[in-house]
Amino acid sequence: MNDELPEEPIFPEADIVYSKFWERLGAFLLDGCIVVAITLPVSYVNITIWKIPVLFILIGLISTLYKPFLECRFGATLGKMIVGLQVVGHDFKKITVSEEIKRLSFYLFPAIIQHIIMIPLYFSTAFEKINDYREFNQQISLKNPSLFWISFIVVILFLADTITFFSTQPNRALHDLYAGTNVIEKIRGTKM
């Protein structure tokens, strides 16, 4: 009889290390810096000089699709990769597109609605007169007071997410519970 243990763990989930708050916060901040570094300079020049409406739509798409695209394709955003985290779906397998959409729906849908609401401003005559970000923000506030309420709802969802994270074991945010996903430390030997 062979008394050797198999090389594959009998219970692979026993090797899973769930992410911690500071790791996730660090990844979130890194992702924010990456997206801002890419979109802010182009957005600023577009507001003050170029005034190309399609470019605003492209910038909105980049900032909105950054997270779902990278997490579906590689299992992590650049921030999560740097910190050593990955998003996994049901049974700790690669996240599916439907899981990712559910996972990000709390933030993805409000972002899409915000961009749709802002599109008419880009094609208005008032937009041509804007010379800096302050004027741009004033025009957005004047023409779209509903954006305040959308932002308010997103803040409430973020707070609910954070409270849920600290009150569940293993630390899972509300959007992870809803989608059936987990954020874990990268499993050794796996590709992101």
Image: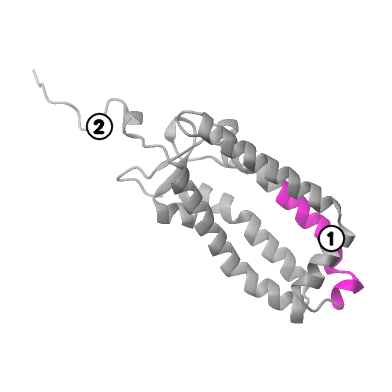
Q: Residue at x 80, y 51 (%)?
A: 148
**Residue on which the image places disc 1:** 141
Of all residues shown, which one is farthest toward the top? 1
- Residue 134 lies, with reference to residue 25, above or below; the image says below
Please state if 35 lies on the left or on the right of 113 as rendered. Answer: left
- Residue 75 lies, with reference to residue 58, above or below; the image says above
Q: Residue at x 73, y 64 (%)?
A: 57
Question: Could you tell me residue 187's position as x and y percent?
Answer: 34, 42
Q: Nearer the viewer, mark 2 or mark 1?
A: 1
Task: Kindly indicate the quadrant of the structure image that contains residue 179.
Answer: top right
Q: Residue at x 31, y 33 (%)?
A: 15
Q: Secondary structure at mark 1?
A: helix
**Residue on which the image places disc 2:** 8
Task: Point out the tag, 2 or 1, that comes first from the N-terminus.
Answer: 2
Q: CA distance from mark 2 to mark 1?
A: 57 Å
- Residue 118 lies, with reference to residue 95, above or below; the image says below
Task: Classify mark 1: residues with Cα within 10 Å, few (<14), some (14-19) or many (20+).
Answer: few
Please state if 172 lies on the left or on the right of 44 as rendered. Answer: left
Secondary structure that dominates the magenta span: helix
Q: What span is in magenta?
A: 110-128
Task: Classify mark 2: residues with Cα within 10 Å, few (<14), some (14-19) or many (20+).
Answer: few
Judge by depth and name the residue closer to the eye, 51 or 30: 30
Task: Kindly indicate the quadrant of the structure image that contains residue 175.
Answer: top right
Task: Kindly indicate the quadrant of the structure image that contains residue 130.
Answer: bottom right
Q: Secondary structure at mark 2?
A: loop
Look at the image and tell me whether residue 190 can be seen.
Answer: yes
Is the N terminus in the top left, top right, bottom left or bottom right quadrant? Answer: top left
Look at the image and tell me whether residue 105 can be seen.
Answer: no
